[in-house]
Image (cartoon, rainbow, N blue to C red):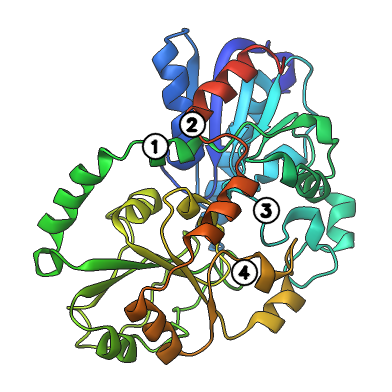
């Protein structure tokens, strides 16, 4: 019914169910369109899905709004799985643009995970072909185009290695002073300490998260690395229930949910610890040390798997016990050359101008 309406050649819709506010890649592309002052009408469709009866009803209404936007927008821009895109027939004269939230290619996703417990079933794909109908996808490097083509079942010539918009942020180091000031105001007791960012990937179903249990011993880490450090914990956006922290650790570890974006936390931190999170690509741009802590690698490979051999791929050491991790932090024997090689492989262009490139490319209809 909405296809009976004309396409508005000056309408852009930004849509996501990762967040209920404009952030990440979508925010940077919106700001670039806004800077150019081209007279586009902009709509926003941000809605997290919840499984309660009211949540399902609200999301059904949201999907009707999405269908209207899909029928009437010149550009419909998303950053993750977005159900309404996969159950409509796109109209000629409009683009569905995927700005995938993760940089690089690390964990398998999309159609690369068919047959895994994490992935969609073949029966589901017969009804809903996920990741279909994208007209343009933007990625960070020519080396990963084939992985995205597999994950989205797309022709490689529709996948453009022009960069990841939000990474423009890391080329604006003057931002750190402003963020440092805000952090010190919120956490005066942590002022002057080196900051370790712990950012694990999400586990389980996207909408059925449990309280997160940290795989390493936070108290033992504090005992070993001393009072010069603080641990900043940032969980995946889907992990809404938070993390279990023992009492008495408030002067060392702090769970940050909405106070700072993940980009701001990366800029604030001196060291990153993760397991399988794709934040490693963004963090490599800062040329700072990265450690990996995992005690379930084989299980994760069975559940989801990677595009590369994990142990030879990662740009930092892999630990499965807290004492070894603490020793590595204290000794500060960091392999910066390994980080540089990783960064140069997964980013073709390092200039902080990705948002400009992508908007220019969209406006030139892919030329």
Q: Kindly check if marks 2 and 1 are in contact, taking CB atoms under 8 A apart as contact.
A: yes
Q: Secondary structure at mark 2?
A: loop
How packed mark 3 is, by other alpha carbons closer than 10 Å (few <14, some 14-19, many 20 or more), is many
Spot occupied by residue 145 in the image (x, y as percentages of width and height) = 76, 42
The residue lying at 80 percent from left, 58 percent from top is: 112
Q: Secondary structure at mark 4?
A: loop
Spot occupied by residue 166 in the image (x, y as percentages of width and height) = 47, 39
Viewer-closest of 352 and 233: 352
Earlier in the chain: of badge 1 and badge 3, it is: 3
User: Which mark, by number, is residue 205?
Assistant: 4
Disc 4 versus disc 2: nearer the observer: 2
Disc 4 versus disc 3: nearer the observer: 3
Spot occupied by residue 256 in the image (x, y as percentages of width and height) = 31, 64
User: Which mark, by number, is residue 290?
Assistant: none
Residue tagged by mark 2? Answer: 351
| Image quarter in which the C terminus is found | top right
Earlier in the chain: of badge 4 and badge 3, it is: 3
Q: Is residue 319 visible?
A: yes
Residue tagged by mark 1? Answer: 171
Earlier in the chain: of badge 3 and badge 2, it is: 3
Earlier in the chain: of badge 4 and badge 2, it is: 4
Left or right position of 366 against 247: right
Q: Secondary structure at mark 1?
A: helix
Disc 1 versus disc 3: nearer the observer: 1
Viewer-closest of 136 and 51: 136
């Amino acid at each position: 019914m909405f296809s009976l309406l004309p396409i508005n050649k000056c309408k852009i819709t930004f849509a996501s169910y990762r967040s209920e506010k404009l952030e990440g890649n979508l925010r940077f592309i919106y700001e670039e369109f806004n800077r150019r002052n081209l007279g586009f009408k902009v709509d926003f469709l941000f809605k997290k899905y919840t499984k309660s009866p009211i949540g399902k009803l609200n999301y059904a209404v949201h999907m009707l709004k999405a269908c209207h936007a899909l029928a009437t927008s010149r550009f419909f821009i998303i950053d993750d799985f977005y159900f309404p895109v996969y159950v409509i027939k796109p109209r000629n004269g409009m683009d569905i643009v995927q700005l995938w939230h993760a940089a690089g290619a690390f964990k398998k996703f999309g159609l690369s995970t068919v047959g895994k417990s994490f992935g969609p079933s073949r029966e589901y794909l017969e009804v809903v072909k996920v990741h279909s109908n994208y007209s343009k996808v933007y990625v960070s490097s020519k080396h990963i185009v084939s992985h995205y083509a597999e994950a989205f079942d797309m022709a490689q010539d529709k996948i453009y290695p022009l960069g990841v918009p939000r990474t423009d942020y890391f080329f604006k180091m003057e931002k750190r002073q402003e963020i440092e000031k805000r952090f010190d105001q919120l956490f005066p007791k942590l002022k002057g300490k080196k900051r370790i960012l712990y950012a694990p990937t999400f586990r389980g179903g996207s909408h059925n998260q449990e309280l997160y249990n940290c795989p390493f011993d936070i108290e033992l880490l504090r005992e070993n690395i001393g009072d010069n450090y603080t641990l900043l914990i940032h969980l995946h956006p889907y992990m809404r229930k938070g993390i279990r922290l023992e009492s008495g650790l408030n002067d060392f570890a702090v769970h940050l949910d909405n106070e700072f974006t993940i980009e701001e936390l990366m800029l604030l931190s001196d060291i990153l610890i993760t397991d399988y999170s794709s934040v490693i690509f963004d963090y490599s741009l800062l040329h700072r040390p990265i450690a990996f802590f995992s005690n379930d690698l084989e299980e994760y490979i069975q559940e989801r798997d990677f595009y590369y051999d994990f142990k030879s791929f990662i740009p930092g050491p892999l630990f499965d016990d807290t004492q070894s991790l603490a020793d590595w932090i204290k000794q500060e024997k960091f392999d910066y050359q390994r980080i540089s090689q990783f960064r140069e492989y997964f980013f073709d262009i390092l200039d902080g101008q990705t948002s400009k490139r992508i908007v220019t490319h969209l406006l030139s209809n892919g030329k």
